[in-house]
Image (cartoon, rainbow, N blue to C red):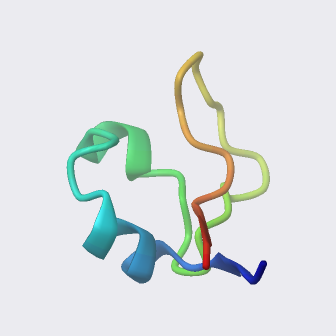
Amino acid sequence: TETLINRKKFLSQYAHEFSKDQLENVDDDGIVRIGSEVKEGDPLVLVLRK
């Protein structure tokens, strides 16, 4: 199983999984930015598996 961490590819498959506000702290690599304040339910890593 290949694991892919990528914001753009994740959003192409799951566009409505998280709100715009929830994705605000996620960088282009799909990982929450260091020092970001996250709330319950916010994504920490956007992961796809093949």
Q: Is residue 8 above or below residue 26?
A: below
Q: Position of residue 34 (x, y in %)?
A: 78, 56
Left/right placement of residue 1 relative to residue 24 reads right
Q: Residue at x 65, y 32 (%)?
A: 37
Image coordinates for residue 20, horizontal then vertical, percent: 25, 46
Rendered position, 3 above or below 23? below
Instruction: Count numbered badges in the picture.
Output: 0
**Which quadrant of the rendered structure holds the C terminus?**
bottom right
Query: Image height check: is 50 above or below 19?
Result: below
Q: Which residue appears at 23% of the width and 58% of the height?
A: 15
Answer with the quarter of the image where residue 40 lies.
top right
Instruction: Please name the residue shown 66% across and 75% down the image.
Output: 5
Quarter of the view holding residue 36: top right
Residue 28 image position (x, y, % from top left): 52, 79
Q: Position of residue 46 (x, y in %)?
A: 58, 60
43 left or right, relative to 16 = right
Q: Which quadrant of the figure has residue 14? A: bottom left
Residue with the most extreme top position: 40
Q: Nearer the viewer, residue 34 or 17?
A: 17
The quarter in which the N terminus is drawn is: bottom right
In percent of the image, x 41 and y 81: which residue is there?
A: 9
- Above/below status of 10 relative to 50: above
